[in-house]
Image (spheres, rainbow, N blue to C red):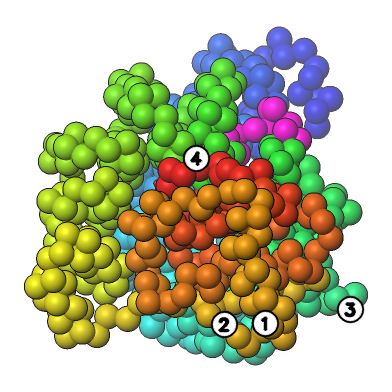
Amino acid sequence: MLKIILQPLYQNSFPPSTYASIFQFLVGKNFVKLGQQVHAHMAVRGVSPNGLVAAKMVAMYASSGEIDSASYIFDSATEPSSLLYNAMIRALTLYGITKRTIEIFFQMHSLGFRGDNFTFPFVFKSCADLSDVWCGKCVHSLILRSGFVFDMYVGTSLVDMYVKCGDLIDARKLFDEMPVRDVSAWNVLIAGYMKDGLFKDAEELFEEMPIRNIVSWTAMISGYAQNGLADESLQLFDKMLDPDSEVRPNWVTVMSVLPACAHSAALDRGKKIHSFAREAGLEKNPSVQTALIAMYAKCGSLVDARLCFDQINPREKKLVAWNTMITAYASHGFGREAVSTFEDMLRAGIQPDKITFTGLLSGCSHSGLVDVGLRYFDCMSLVYFVEKGHDHYACVVDLLGRAGRLVEAYNLISQMPMAAGPSIWGSLLAAGRSHRNLEIAELAAKKLFILEPDNSGNYIVLSNMYAEAGMWEEVTHLRIQQKSRRIMKSPGCSWIEFDGKAHLFLGGDTSHPQAEQIYLFLEALPAKIKAAGYMPDTTFALHDVSEEEKEQNLSSHSERLAIAFGILNTSPGTVLRVTKNLRICGDCHTAIKLVSKIYEREIIVRDVNRFHHFKDGSCSCRDYW
DNA sequence: ATAGGGTTAG
């Protein structure tokens, strides 16, 4: 076929069916230039494309990335046909132009072309992407009597539409009514249940279905991972690696399981999955590489994250990869690196988006780069064409608040074009606390009591501030309020990975087999610190007593237990990586700095907000978090 | 020519 096309095209025009076959042949081949030559050949000879030819041209252009040319052909077609409409609807769906897809469908319908089994799957997909259940139902009702609902493809896309619109009841009903179901229909429903957190229903379907393919497995694994069920996700992934498993993981599976490692900070597991990806030839996939960056960053290994980032082929280094790297630096308090990576990104010609700026601004905030952050914030919409969103304001309120510029922070909130959410008032409250501004703290706390009445932390912060100021009546009042709403504080816990297993400690925990040794170690610590000639920063400890576990003995905070366990069980010099479910307390922060110096250990603590790299007596956050 | 699993986030 190619030979025929490549023969000189100077001869007379061909009959339409020939042009149609040529364009048909070029679909998906990415020979745009050739397609354009044939197109010109036709145009020069005054042949106007009939419905069939136009349809093939639309398909050809759309499949080679030329959606504008496809649209042009469609708009200038003189002879509309079902086939042409189908081709255009398919092309638009391919490019995610959902609204136009639906418009074109209704235009088609109004011209008397009713649509067929090659039309509806795309229309329902568009409704699904828009979460437009109203439109979906409307199209559904149009075809109720036509019999197309019994087509397997149409049925599956309908079930998917209801799933994506959150209507699982109707999705299930349609699924049960389908006369023929293949594995795709099952997968759609499984994915639907996992999104909604209905694990039992998803598991039942997964067991029940006659054939499971890689998509079924991946839907389960990613569903668990996205809902924070990291163990379930990793276990199922292991099952898939079993030699007599029915399927092998592919790049989507690997990409989906990595967030489970990230969630539980399981660096060793993550490294094993990385090795698997390497052996399976999936390491060069840019999406896998991006998921690896995020995994390494969240498991505390920025070095490995950067290595993965550098290994991505520059041509394949897309927005998400840059965002992930910038965010990784930001969460570790490496603000300067976040900024320089952002500048590298601009030089590479990548257009930043709103996530880029949340990463960049939070990086500035976490490392005290106040002026740099403010400069980027001021010009982000005019220079980089990214609209300022709620989260960007949150970063800058945080930035100003940490720097003690509380009035400016408050003024910024008042000027926001949208309502400030809990993250913003939370930042302001934290800033009010650390800079001892009761007025601002009170103001922020009162907003938070309305916005998130169940969050115990807000009551505790304000109550501690009242206590510090000797305002005991207010303390009592807050306590009564808290009791009446039955607000429970969440218990602090920390874990550390050792020997392929997570060792978890609660505050004051004595249940660990090595508890005795751990407590002996911690009790000996103050003397060691003194002997080494360091003075604990008592001023800091005095006014920043842990807000979450005040009544508890500071020296048995969960992060200290985990670190003690780590020092006792690993060889000298091993980096310790500890994860905590709450914010690290000021007293522990001071203690860990000293431990890092005395025991010559690098200690990396991931708390609920960010990372702390303790080394040689100081922390990467420069006591600024 | 048609449907299903998807990585980044104060």
For the record, the magenta segment spans A310-323
Return the x and y of residue A621 as percentages of the image width and height: 50, 43
User: Pointers 3 and 1 in contact (CB under 8 A)?
Assistant: no
Q: Earlier in the sequence, mark 1 or mark 2?
A: 2
Seen from the viewer's position, the closer of residues A399 and A350 is: A399
Seen from the viewer's position, the closer of residues A159 and A76 is: A159
In the displayed structure image, the side of residue A515 where residue A277 appears, left or right:
right
What quarter of the picture does the N terminus of chain A occupy? top right
Return the x and y of residue A356 as percentages of the image width and height: 46, 36
Which chain is mark 1 on? Answer: A
Q: Earlier in the sequence, mark 4 or mark 3?
A: 3
Residue positioned 17% across, 41% down in the render = A410
Return the residue at label 1.
Answer: A515
Query: Which element carries disc 2, helix, strand or loop?
Result: loop
Return the residue at label 3.
Answer: A244
Q: Earlier in the sequence, mark 4 or mark 1?
A: 1
Return the residue at label 2.
Answer: A509
Q: How far is disc 2 from disc 3 in space, using C-alphas?
A: 42 Å
Q: Residues within 10 Å of mark 2 (few under 14, many from 20)?
A: some
Return the residue at label 4.
Answer: A622
